[in-house]
Image (cartoon, helix red, strand yellow):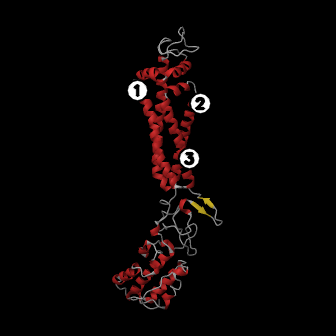
């Protein structure tokens, strides 16, 4: 380091030969042990490796390795994007010294959006399911008429509400656990819930708007049957369709001399009121459901400040063997430009600053571009990868 630096020379041809020697399979480190990250240049690595940091990010402290794998700070500049071998923070679960997991204490804006949207989704899903169950259990006044005359709409609405409640539970699981797999299913099932939601709304709107009287006439004559007519007559206090002599079911209150009016007028009036309320409630929920769907699509993959699960593909994960190859290429480049002494000194400092004393090194093969390796670089290759 005391001697003046040698002028840099063009390292392109010898460097290609050196890299070609590594990629040709002559080195044992490249056999099923190195990743494709060996082709990365040293300038592409984060500068946070050699910075001094404290917990608050200010002031000076010891040389520390940056947090591997991202986390909440993953989108900061010069922040590492790849998880380490012992990083268990893939799904927002942190591990303390005792090995027990502890949940993340900070929620990002995407998670808050999902949380609020799922609260809204859960509220109207539970409300719809409770309303349908009250109709099925005949709790409300004239609920039996709906069970007889609007069976199809009621079944579809109950199915939609049940699936919506199940979807909201999946959403809560994904939000609380930061599980992107659950949130993916949550975003997908929201589309199915939307289809089941608008179906009874369309059916009730079409039934009420287009010739409701003709549909009620056909239903009373063909679909209700004796039992269905009897249930409508008992609920509406009527007898027969026009009179006790036309399509009536005989009961204790409905007979030939009964003074009760026909059921056509009260039944059509009741259907008109129920159908209007039905599709009005459903179509008023549609904007809220669209908002939930958009929120799930935009925020499900960002429940933490890490893209996906924070994992590089296996072929590109950086391991210690690959670091040995990268540092060897880096040493070759330094030797070609500044000489053997400078390269050895920089390499030794890099290993000490990065705490890479345990990193395996590859046995060096002498070539034109790397004749500087002697006793100084042999000390770096004292530990072979087979000895780990």
Near-viewer residue (148 or 183)? 148
Q: Position of residue 293 (x, y in %)?
A: 46, 46
Give the number of the mark in front: 2 or 1. 2
CB contact under 8 Å: marks 2 and 1 = no
Please identify the quarter of the rendering in which residue 250 is found.
top right
Q: Position of residue 72 (x, y in %)?
A: 53, 61
Q: Earlier in the sequence, mark 1 or mark 3?
A: 3
Q: Position of residue 265 (x, y in %)?
A: 47, 17
Residue furthest to the top: 257
Near-viewer residue (304 or 86)? 86
Give the number of the mark in front: 3 or 2. 2
Labelled disc at residue 209: 1
Residue 107 vertical position relative to residue 202 in the rendered view, above or below: below
Q: Residues within 10 Å of mark 2 (few under 14, many from 20)?
A: few
Residue 27 vertical position relative to residue 219 in the rendered view, above or below: below
Q: Position of residue 267 (x, y in %)?
A: 49, 20
CB contact under 8 Å: marks 3 and 2 = no
Near-viewer residue (226 or 106)? 226
Please identify the quarter of the rendering in which residue 211 is found.
top left
Labelled disc at residue 333: none
Residue 226 vertical position relative to residue 63 in the rendered view, above or below: above
| Mark 3 → mark 2, Cα distance in angstroms | 24 Å
Q: Earlier in the sequence, mark 3 or mark 2?
A: 2
| Mark 2 → mark 1, Cα distance in angstroms | 29 Å
Q: Residues within 10 Å of mark 3 (few under 14, many from 20)?
A: some
Residue at figure coordinates x 52%, y 57% from the top left: 304
| Residue on which the image places disc 3 | 169
CB contact under 8 Å: marks 1 and 3 = no
Residue 109 visible here: no
| Residue on which the image places disc 2 | 137
């Amino acid at each position: 380091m005391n001697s003046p630096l040698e002028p840099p020379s063009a390292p392109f041809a010898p460097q290609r030969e050196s890299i070609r020697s590594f990629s040709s399979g002559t080195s044992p480190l490249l056999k099923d042990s190195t990743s494709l990250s060996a082709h990365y240049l040293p300038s592409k690595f984060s500068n946070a490796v050699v910075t001094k940091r404290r917990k608050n990010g200010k002031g000076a402290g010891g040389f520390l390795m940056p947090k591997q794998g991202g986390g909440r700070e993953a989108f900061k500049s010069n922040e590492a994007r790849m998880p380490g071998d012992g990083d268990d923070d893939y799904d927002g679960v942190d591990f303390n010294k005792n090995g027990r997991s502890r949940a993340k204490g900070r929620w990002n804006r995407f998670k808050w959006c999902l949380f609020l949207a799922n609260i809204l989704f859960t509220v109207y899903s539970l409300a719809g399911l409770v309303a349908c169950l009250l109709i099925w259990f005949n709790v409300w006044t004239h609920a039996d008429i709906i069970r007889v005359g609007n069976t199809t709409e009621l079944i579809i609405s109950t199915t939609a509400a049940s699936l919506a409640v199940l979807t909201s539970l999946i959403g809560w699981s994904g939000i609380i656990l930061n599980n992107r797999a659950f949130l993916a299913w949550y975003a997908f099932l929201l589309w199915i819930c939307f289809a089941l939601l608008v179906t009874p709304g369309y059916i009730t709107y079409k039934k009420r708007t287009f010739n409701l009287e003709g549909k009620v006439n056909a239903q009373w004559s063909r679909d209700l049957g004796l039992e269905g007519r009897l249930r409508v007559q008992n609920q509406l206090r009527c007898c027969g369709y026009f009179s006790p002599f036309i399509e009536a079911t005989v009961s204790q209150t409905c007979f030939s001399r009964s003074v009760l009016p026909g059921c056509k007028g009260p039944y059509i009036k009741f259907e008109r009121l129920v159908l209007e309320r039905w599709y009005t409630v459903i179509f008023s929920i549609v904007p809220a459901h669209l908002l939930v769907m958009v929120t799930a699509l935009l925020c499900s993959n960002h429940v933490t400040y890490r893209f996906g699960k924070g994992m590089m593909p296996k072929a590109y994960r950086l391991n210690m063997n690959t670091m040995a190859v990268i540092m060897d290429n880096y040493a070759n480049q330094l030797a070609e430009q500044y000489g053997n002494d400078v390269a050895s000194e920089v390499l030794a400092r890099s290993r000490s600053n990065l705490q890479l004393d345990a990193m395996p090194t590859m046995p060096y093969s002498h070539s034109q571009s790397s004749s500087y390796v002697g006793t100084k670089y042999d000390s770096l290759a004292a530990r072979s990868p087979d000895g780990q």
